[in-house]
Image: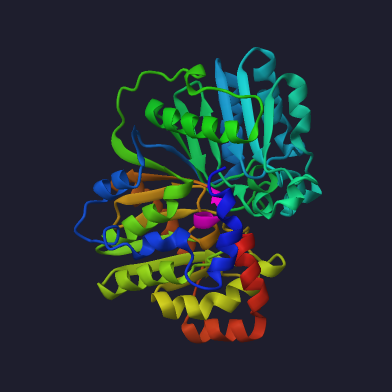
Amino acid sequence: MRRSGLILLLLVAFFITSCSSTKAFTSSELLSVETPVEKKLSSIGAVSVSVPFPEVYFDGTEWLHRLTELFEEAEDYILVSTFLGSDSPALEDMYGALMDAAERGVRVYFLMDGISSFDMTESKKYMTPLYFLRQSGIHLAEYNPLTVTHLFNPATIVLRDHEKLVVVDGDKAAIGGMNMNYISLGAGEGETQRDSMYLFDSPSLAAALKDEFVMLWNEVSVDKIAPDEFHVRPDDGGEYPAYLVSTDGIAAMYASLIGSARENIIILPYLPALDNNMKSALRTARERGVYIRMIMPVDLRGYAASGIYQELPNLMKATGCDVFLSIADESGQVLPLLHEKLMIVDSRYVVIGSSNFNFRSMSLSEELALVVDSQELAELLEKHTDEIAGISRNISIEEAEKLRDEEGSSLAYLFMLFGG
């Protein structure tokens, strides 16, 4: 598997020097303001596609209903990859539609990460593992399942498949941050995690996602498939150029965009554990006058909050970013966790997908990100982030230091860095 043999070396090397997986953030070529973004992305192997304006979903319940419709309408094949996948009463119709599709002859391939059955979000109270899907003819595979054999290989424990994608019949293509579990889709108003999914009517994106899915599926399943088994509708061209980046190019993609920024960067980083290379690239952008706003959650479960608070002052000092903590609304009511992954550069380039802006996503996970060159989409998402910032707490370094002293934990931060 990609990079799996390097995992142990990465874990050791991080304590000695900056991790090689983020060396892209030190590349003078990628950080050059003068080199066009398109040229940079081409040089790192990004797949060029074209897309229309997407259907945008910020509400898990709405995406659940749309996903159910897509499964009901499918005629040829459905490809699904998710990090956390499980059933619950609220998701029964969606998984029922998926099973019905398989039973009427639609080819369904479902790839989930091997820790899905060990989900530790709020879904654990409601979840049912998905192995029952095989009874209807669905091809179900797990990425690095936690088996006894795999326990003797630490790489298979650390390296996870964090991708979230859906492809239906070679034209409908979805990408984003929502898992297919209770807390992402089924918890209901005021409980479902704050997140996003983007649905494109784009054969070229569907083709690129299909190829990525097939490659990853064949790495973990004995049920081999070939890309040409899945027909893609002829592409009549989309309105916006876009670039699909997977796993090994994620760090270089972020470095390219940060290096090209001239005015502003907005980042929604979940578990913002950055190494020194990443911090330095942001600091360099700030020093040339780029305003950087980070809107981040604080996951109040267990270690995550302590880890974030421990690192927060250093992150702010090292990068110069303006930081907003999205935890509670104006009345003090704790909000659902902000799980969204998003970057907007110069009100033009939008990065969406599964990848968090953190060390783990660039080093220890299979990831997908789509860079869309669209001022219209950027405008919509800037308004969206303004709304989140409006009910978030813009903190000072002094406040961050107080949170670190009162609630921070170095051990929790180290676990967050590698555990995600």
What percent of the width, then of the height, locates residue 320? 38, 76
In the image, is 367 to the left or to the right of 416? left
Please identify the quadrant where the C terminus is shown: bottom right
Query: What is the quadrant of residue 134 in the picture?
Result: top right
Relative depth, front residue between 119 and 379: 119
| Above or below, 301 relative to 256 | below
Query: What is the quadrant of residue 95 in the picture?
Result: top right
Please identify the quadrant where the N terminus is shown: top right
Tell me which colouring the rendered structure shows: rainbow
Relative depth, front residue between 191 and 124: 124
What residue appears at the point 37 percent right and 52 percent down from the top-left corner? Answer: 253
Magenta segment, which residues? Answer: 361-366
Q: Is residue 393 visible?
A: yes
In the image, is 272 to the left or to the right of 250? right
* Total marks in image: 0
Relative depth, front residue between 184 and 334: 184
| Above or below, 219 relative to 362 | above
What residue appears at the point 43 percent right and 27 percent down from the top-left corner? Answer: 207
Q: Is residue 333 visible?
A: no
Looking at this rendering, what residue extends furthest in the left direction?
34
Asked whether 138 falls inside the magenta stretch, the response is no
What percent of the width, then of the height, locates residue 20? 46, 62
Relative depth, front residue between 83 and 14: 14
Asked whether 362 falls inside the magenta stretch, the response is yes
What residue appears at the point 68 percent right and 49 percent down from the top-left corner? Answer: 183
Query: What is the quadrant of residue 219 in the picture?
Result: top right
| Above or below, 333 relative to 139 | below
